[in-house]
Amino acid sequence: MAEKRRNTELLEKIAKRIKDLRAEHDVTQEVFYNDTGINIGRIERAKRDVGITTIQIICEYFKISLNDFFKKIK
């Protein structure tokens, strides 16, 4: 079986970006979950790999493009 690849540094940057978006919009994890059904707490701890579809939903929720989301991840 192939070893699963995991880019912890990238996951931590994505987690920080999502936390920053929530703070900018004054949205709690609970409110986000109630609105989207996504348990963002797991993602924000960078313990779980996040799919692009989930990131797209997050972007739609905060009304930003995928490009804008990734622009701030360096």
Image (cartoon, rainbow, N blue to C red):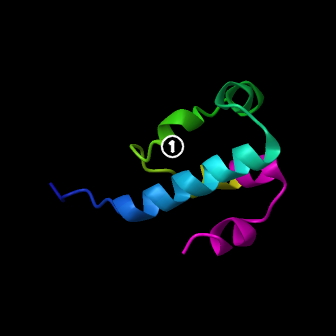
At x 39%, y 43%, the residue is 47
Sort mark 1 into few (<14), some (14-19) or many (20+) by Cα contacts within 10 Å: many
Q: Secondary structure at mark 1?
A: helix
Q: Main secondary structure of the magenta part?
A: helix
For the residue marked with disc 1, what is the amino acid?
Ile
Q: Nearer the viewer, residue 52 or 34?
A: 34
Q: What is the tally of numbered marks visible in this picture? A: 1
Q: Residue at x 72, y 45 (%)?
A: 23
Residue 31: x and y in percent read: 74, 27
User: In the rendered image, is residue 14 in sight?
Assistant: yes
**In front: 49, or 72?**
72
x and y, in percent, of residue 12 in the image: 45, 56
- Residue 22: which quarter of the image? top right
Residue 69 percent coordinates (x, y): 69, 65
Image quadrant containing the N terminus: bottom left
**Residue 51 can be seen in this image:** no
Please indicate whether residue 22 sits to the left or right of residue 6 in the image: right
Left or right side of 60 for 56 = left
Task: Residue 71: say if magenta.
Answer: yes
Asked if the magenta segment contains residue 27, the reply would be no
Q: Which residue is mark 1?
A: 43
* Quarter of the rendering occupied by the C terminus: bottom right
Residue range (magenta): 57-74
Q: Residue at x 54, y 58 (%)?
A: 14
Of residues 56 and 47, which is closer to you in this image? 47
Image coordinates of residue 48 in percent, x first then y, are 42, 44
